[in-house]
Amino acid sequence: MLSLSTKDIQLKQSAADKQEAIKAIAAGLEQQGLVETGYVNGMLDREAQNSTFLGNGIAIPHGTTDTRGLVKETGVRVHHFPQGVNWGDSKTVYLAIGIAAKSDEHLGILKQLTKVLSADGVEDKLKTSDSAEGLIAILNGEAQLEADFDESYVQLAFPATDLVQLTAVAAGLVKNHQSASNETVADAIASGATHLGQGLWIAKSHKDVSRTALSFVTPTEPFEEAGSPVKGLLFVAACNGAHVNNMNYLAQLLFKNQAGKLFNAAADQVVTLLTEEALEGNTEVFKIRNPHGLHARPGAMLVSVAKKFNSNILVANLNGEGKAVNAKSLMKVIALGVKQGHELQFTAQGDDADEALAAIGQAIADGLGEGK
């Protein structure tokens, strides 16, 4: 898909404003032989139509559909601005990724980049990065920003009768993925588990952990430990802060007194509960008809409509991974990789949920600023 090399990265750049930054990036794309002279005008026109600022200190300047004919080869040019560039509306950009794309392949590039760049804490990592190799590692997703956790880290109905057994199994799941060692397992058992309430326990270790990962285990039959029920145990093996979001989702379940959902869920549902935002509200499905899908401009229009309402709004691409994200975050919306014909499921919760869904549906029907 996207293969970055050090020649694509320009460190320690500075610019008086975003127009100057875009011109420099366009010149870099031209020097690399990716675009012909004049592509810069399309990049400036695109910026004038709608800001390419995504959030987290990142912008993705690119040309208009009218200037695609000037693209010789799909690629990117990355400029790092450690002091930041004023991108308008009090937004500061530390990393600008200039994109040259010959067709809808830019959606794949955007999906790859935004999936990585939407992770919490990435802005600070980008600001402080001092090497092209370090930036490439972040952009390629090689720098861990999210905890490892999928169905293979979940063991349901294990025949355990005490917490030591549950902890050993949970830590062993992480070890089996080569993210930890025997020392990790021993430390988890020695440290013991803590009751979080509602029958949920947590164990953790940071010893000899190579990648942050979670695991979850339930016993065949609930039992008691020190007078408290044991219905399930979450194990956290951490060597960085990649698990913070998962802990926030866990906190939401506990606060809503909904930890029981974890004990009654299938393995894939357990993962969903601890890795995705969730809402219980009104739901509608709309089909995207834009010829080039949800690139920056229609994506920004969709987000702008969602932001007009107080309700919490999530959106999932039913033709993609199906993961629900915040519909008011441009970066997360673009990361869905929505193409023409894809169906989006919106869930809204709040006093103006019905109005929000109606407005979103109308905006999509109207073409999100690109005509019907």
Image (spheres, grey):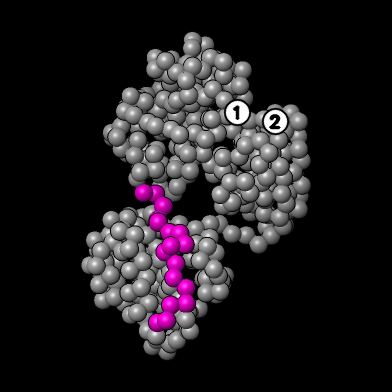
Circle 2 packing at 10 Å, graded few (<14), some (14-19), many (20+), is some
Q: Is residue 154 visible?
A: yes
Q: Which residue lies under the disc numbered 1?
A: 50
Q: Is residue 177 magenta?
A: no
Mark identifier at residue 369: 2
Alpha carbon separation for disc pair 2 and 1: 10 Å
Of tags 2 and 1, the one toward the viewer is 2
Amino acid type for the residue under numbered disc 1: Asn
What segment is highlighted magenta in the picture? 144-160
Q: Can you see residue 273?
A: no
Q: Position of residue 6 (x, y in %)?
A: 31, 28
Q: Does the CB distance between marks 2 and 1 fall below 8 Å?
A: yes
Q: Is residue 147 magenta?
A: yes
Q: Is residue 365 left or right of residue 105?
A: right
Picture layout, residue 208 above or below residue 345: below
Residue for point 54% across, 30% down: 105
